[in-house]
Amino acid sequence: MTALLSVFFTVSGAAICLLAAVGVLRLPDFFMRLHAATKAGVAGCGLILVGVAFAEPSPGMWIKVAIAVIFLLMTTPVAGHLLARAGYVGGVPLWTGTRKDQLQGELRRGNFDRLPGIEPLYTGFDQEVSGREQTQARLPAIKDIRFGVIRDQVDFVASRALALADTTGIRPSAHVIIDEGMVDATRDPANTHDVVERFAQQALEQLNALISHAGQSVDIRTEEGDPEDLLAVAGGADVLLLMPSEGWFHHGADLPTPGMSWGPDGLLRLPSLHGGPVLFVGSRPAPVDNQQVVIRDDGAAHILDVIEWALSNGLWRNPKLHLVWQGDELRQQEVAAIAVRFGATLTLHQMASVKPGDSEIPEHLAGADALILGKTPRPLRTKWYGHKWTERISPGWKGEVLLFEDALDESTLQTRFRLSDVGIGPATRVTQRLGEALSFTENERRAMRRNGGQNDSPASVSEIVVTLANGAHADETIDQAITLARTHRIPLVGLAVVDTKMLRYAGPLPVGGISYAANLRRNLLEKARRSLADTVQSFEQRAQTAGVSFSLFMEEGDPVKILRTRQRPRTLMLIGRDSWFDHGVGEGRANPLEYLARRGIYPLISVAKSPDEVQTISFVHDGTPHSDRMLQWFLATNPWPEAKLRLLPDPAIRDEEIDAARKISAATLEMEEERGDVFSKRSQRPDVLIFGNEGHVGWINRARAISRPDYSDIPIVVFG
């Protein structure tokens, strides 16, 4: 019997070790290979040792095997965990199929590919900040208020946003979003989308009822995509983001997500991604004035600026401040000076340093109305082993939490820079909010650093990017890009993209269909590449014939992520009207312009015909601040300087909602304004039509999409 058990354990252990070895050789990334080496490797070796003990049974042998197995279990998994952690912090690449990085925001990630001795990226920030003046410059007054709309969490968040809008005079924007990542990670994405869309519709109905009762105007956005990308504004220190203290943009659709290692939950990652303040609204209505506001001084250098910013912007009326401090007398005096300047009372509560697992504030302050924190409580999960994140603040906490993470935090340093340091004037400052993903390459930052932060291009437009996609309007798009590059005498960039995300999806597979699906994916990709090669060849020939210098980039992956990396403050990005990056091989996109705009790729120029000369431009303004910002961007870049511009206000908006646009245009050029259904007059159809905010009709506001003027026969359309 012992011989049979020896054979069984030895063969089983050897088989598991073989699987571990195959995993180490074949798994796609470092972290998966470590899983195979530690888990399967330890299990296999342990079984072999047990088999050896059964082969030579004796008390001494069993003691030796037991000690060996214990040491294996105590050392190898721990070593593997530490190696994986070091690899993650060092920037070892993740598998390209990774849907969610659950450690994002919890561990700082380095650049694995950066060689020793190479200087770090220049960000525009001085590395040492001293004195109050410099820190104040990073915390400007509120200019924009946006809030997330989540089913069953609408009342408190929307009410708080409307109250702030009434105080500041700023028209807020509400964002109803469907989390595409969560939908794609479920077993049945189509059914999940229907469920989440129905729940989101209910959230929108709750919001509309509240707005009607309040009698205030709100700019409502309905979007699909990654909520973190759609909500967070890089460098948007003047944009206040309001969110509920729980919930996410699956809107309560509690469906299994086997494609995610954790449930969909990005709420606490927003403060580190958003360049401005984030206010998590509590589940208890706060009083109108005399609010009890707790300041948790954890030693963060910027907490004084956050206090001053909150009081100067009127987040609370006649607040009673409570400073929870750790014995720093100088800090106490600085907070007291701020409180005196704004006429607020201050009470001191000394508290020892907080250990992991302790409450952030004393128990007797758990009933306060608001809390100011310098850093988001870790871990970044709204629920951790069944406990809400607000319980980590204090058991029973139901107030609101203001977070404005340090602007010099290394995790967000690469996307935050002063626009004045890179030669961008105030007129184009708005594009940082429009693009929501501005980034500069290392070479560009070094070049700007050598030039003293100035861009030596005399043109308002710095770059023309044309997306190369095989479609009915590919040649017209290339011709218009060449015309713009030649007019402005600026670089022309051809961006050739293959949408592998679409082409690799083979749909539900029958039993035994894996090999067929793999062949299908491979054939589709080859066809798309061949089709793209024809478009690239046409682009090169046309650019050479026109005498325009160009550069060419070829990428494969998710087109949205690839296009987002090419967005710059003064870049014009062009795409064919009906083109998509499957190059006629896949299912395509019915409305590629709307699809990309809803995912943050805007301003975006869609071309159906390349006119010999652009003479008339019409700008459709819907009365929102977003349209104002789009108009400001257009006037700053000025792609068609000789054309005549007409402002077309939406017939439904009030006259005062267009005042800001009139002031913007009056300071720059003489512009016509016309109301009414001008699109019914065929003679007045423009060469270029710009929708200031029509790229975000989304999946709910279909009535607005139907009422939009038909632009099928207009040569060039721009979505903002």
Image (cartoon, rainbow, N blue to C red):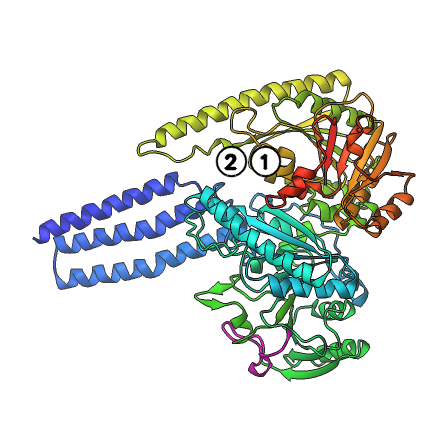
Q: Is residue 701 left or right of residue 20?
A: right
Residue in view at x 56 percent, y 54 percent: 202
Q: Is residue 185 above or below residue 510?
A: below
Observer-nearest residue: 412 or 48? Answer: 412
What element does badge 1 sit on? helix
Residue matched to label 1? 559
- Residue 147, position in %: x, y? 65, 58
- Residue 491, position in %: x, y? 76, 30
In terms of secondary structure, what is the magenta stretch mainly? Answer: loop
Observer-nearest residue: 485 or 704? Answer: 704
| Residue stretch in magenta | 353-370
Q: Amino acid type of disc 1? A: Pro
Observer-nearest residue: 718 or 707? Answer: 707
Q: Is residue 711 above or below residue 361?
A: above
Q: Is residue 425 visible?
A: no
Quadrant for residue 608, please give it: top right
Q: Say whether residue 354 is magenta.
A: yes
Q: Is residue 327 above or below residue 39?
A: below
How far separated are the C-alphas under marks 2 and 1?
8 Å
Q: Residues within 10 Å of mark 1 (few under 14, many from 20)?
A: many
Q: Is residue 455 left or right of residue 84?
A: right
